[in-house]
Image (cartoon, rainbow, N blue to C red):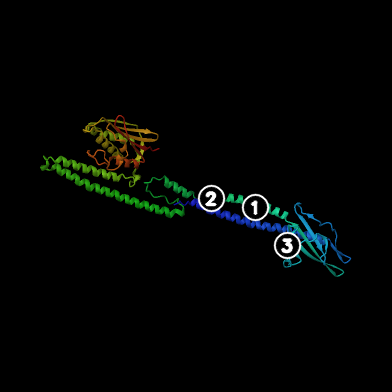
């Protein structure tokens, strides 16, 4: 389904409306000016007829024309059209002018002055018929004057007006459409600003949108979105409380069961005691990992908890605390860090990230017989505006086909070894919470490097 654009719809509606208004104005103005042009030429014909009337007189009982040669094939002012005239007496005899000039139909003659359209010499003409009464010794005499002209001058002037108005109309339409585009873009600026603000927000940011700067037209929409944010936040808070309750309710009886088993005198020399304790430890670890996996879900974690922290300092404290344990497991340990790398993060979940990376290395960087392999190293680097954590081991590594799958929950390469299959999944969750990227790659001749890239605070 095609997405509807408010901007396109507004521009289409405004442009169409303005074009229709401009075309309507063009038609009205053109018709009005055409009427004025025709009236101007008709008035010129009437003026010519009156000039002829002024030259008429009666002599010896006949109507005479003072300058008979004046009206023969008169030319218009532009020289492109022709003017014709004819003067008739009471007996329809032509006193002067052109023979056979057409007369109007009787039903079109309204009064002594009649304008009409006709053809003369196969050319369209505009003609005027005027009847004039004169007296000589109280005897009336009637003269009929016909003045006609061809239409070249009228049509030429009307065409010039048409071209001029068309050009002006096109310019007006262009300006109107341009103004519409600018106006629509200007009017949509608050909406575009809101869109840009929402796009810039982190997808997990559930803080309400500020309603003060929102246009009234979308205020109800923003209020609905804010209500949804509140409901989601309550739901996530409920989930966190549930996880905390589950954590307490599960860890407490497991801890009590372990203490009871260790204190049970009947089990002191039992071969099953160590196996039972191992099962309890596995259950406790799996429970903690499940709860941490749920707690660090990027879709449910409140990122407002993330604050500026010194990643270098946090990694250094972690390394110092874990060195004895690493040596106790039979591994060597190397640490290198660049000072004062600040990121926005949560110290507790970052420690969990480091702990899971270390646990993964301690568990899998071993020979098939279970002997530790080489050195575990932790490096904190700076590169291209990013803080980088590299945790490397010298174990057998991971087959290329499994490098992505090991990030899936409950996926384990070696099912014979104890583990929940959630460690690297938790690391991936925590990395996503910090807008960080996670990459796994094998080292040569053997070993695995896990790299986390955190954006630095500027």
Q: Name which quarter of the figure residue 18 lies in.
A: bottom right
Q: Answer yes or no: is residue 346 visible.
A: no
- The residue that label 3 is drawn on is 116
Q: Badge 2 local density, few (<14 within 10 Å), some, or many (20+)?
A: few
Q: Are dots 3 and 2 in contact, CB under 8 Å?
A: no
Left or right, 63 with respect to 151, comes to right
Q: Name which quarter of the figure residue 132 lies in.
A: bottom right
Q: Could you say where residue 173 lies in the image, as x and y percent from the top left? A: 59, 51
Please tell me which residue lies in front, 147 or 242. 147
Mark 3 residue element:
strand
Q: Name which quarter of the figure residue 290 lies in.
A: top left
Quadrant of the snapshot with the C terminus? top left
- The residue that label 1 is drawn on is 165
Q: Could you say where residue 217 lies in the image, as x and y percent from the top left? A: 46, 54
Mark 1 residue element:
helix
Number of marks: 3
Separation (CA) of disc 3 from disc 1? 28 Å
Residue name at image x 47 percent, y 48 percent: 192
- Camera-nearest label, 3 or 1: 3
Label whose residue precedes the other's in the sequence (1 or 2): 1
Residue name at image x 41 percent, y 54 percent: 223
Residue name at image x 28 percent, y 49 percent: 241
Separation (CA) of disc 1 from disc 2? 26 Å
Q: Is residue 409 shown above or below 109? A: above
Q: Badge 3 local density, few (<14 within 10 Å), some, or many (20+)?
A: some
- The residue that label 2 is drawn on is 183
Q: Could you say where residue 397 lies in the image, as x and y percent from the top left? A: 29, 34
Q: Answer yes or no: is residue 32 visible.
A: yes
């Amino acid at each position: 389904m095609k997405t509807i654009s408010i901007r396109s719809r507004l521009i289409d509606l405004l442009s169409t409306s303005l074009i229709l208004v401009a075309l309507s104005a063009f038609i009205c103005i053109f018709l009005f000016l055409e009427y004025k042009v025709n009236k101007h030429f008709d008035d010129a014909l009437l003026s010519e007829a009156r000039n002829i009337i002024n030259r008429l007189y009666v002599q010896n009982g006949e109507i005479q024309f003072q300058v008979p040669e004046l009206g023969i094939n008169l030319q218009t002012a532009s020289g492109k059209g022709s003017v014709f005239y004819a003067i008739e007496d009471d007996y329809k005899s032509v006193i002067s002018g052109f023979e056979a000039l057409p007369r109007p139909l009787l039903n079109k003659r309204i009064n002594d002055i009649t304008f009409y359209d006709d053809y003369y010499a196969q050319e369209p003409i505009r003609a005027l018929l005027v009847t004039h009464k004169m007296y000589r010794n109280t005897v009336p005499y009637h003269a009929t004057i016909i003045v006609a002209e061809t239409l070249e001058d009228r049509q030429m002037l009307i065409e010039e007006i048409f071209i001029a108005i068309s050009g002006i109309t096109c310019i007006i339409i262009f300006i109107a459409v341009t103004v519409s585009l600018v106006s629509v873009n200007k009017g949509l600026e608050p909406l575009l600003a809101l869109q840009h603000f929402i796009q810039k927000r982190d997808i997990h940011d559930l803080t309400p949108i500020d309603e003060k700067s929102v246009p009234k037209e979308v205020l109800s929409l923003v209020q609905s979105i804010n209500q949804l944010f509140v409901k989601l936040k309550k739901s996530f808070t409920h989930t966190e409380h549930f996880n905390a309750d589950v954590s307490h309710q599960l860890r407490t009886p497991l801890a009590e069961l372990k203490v009871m088993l260790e204190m049970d005198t009947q089990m002191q020399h039992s071969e099953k005691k160590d196996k039972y304790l191992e099962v309890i430890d596995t259950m406790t670890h799996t429970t903690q990992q499940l709860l941490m996996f749920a707690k660090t879900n990027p879709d449910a974690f409140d990122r407002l908890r993330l604050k500026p922290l010194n990643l270098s300092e946090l990694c250094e404290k972690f390394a110092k605390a874990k060195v004895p344990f690493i040596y106790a497991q039979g591994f060597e340990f190397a640490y290198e860090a660049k000072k004062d790398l600040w990121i926005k993060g949560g110290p507790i979940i970052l420690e969990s990230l480091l702990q899971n990376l270390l646990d993964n290395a301690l568990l899998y960087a071993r020979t098939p017989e279970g002997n530790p392999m080489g050195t575990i190293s932790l490096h904190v680097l700076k590169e291209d505006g990013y803080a980088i954590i590299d945790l490397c081991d010298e174990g057998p590594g991971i087959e290329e086909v499994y490098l992505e799958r090991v990030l899936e929950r409950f996926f384990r390469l070696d099912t014979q070894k104890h583990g929940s299959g959630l460690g690297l999944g938790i690391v991936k969750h925590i990395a996503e919470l910090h807008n960080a990227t996670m990459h796994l790659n094998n080292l040569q001749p053997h070993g695995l490097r896990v790299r986390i890239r955190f954006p630095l605070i500027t």
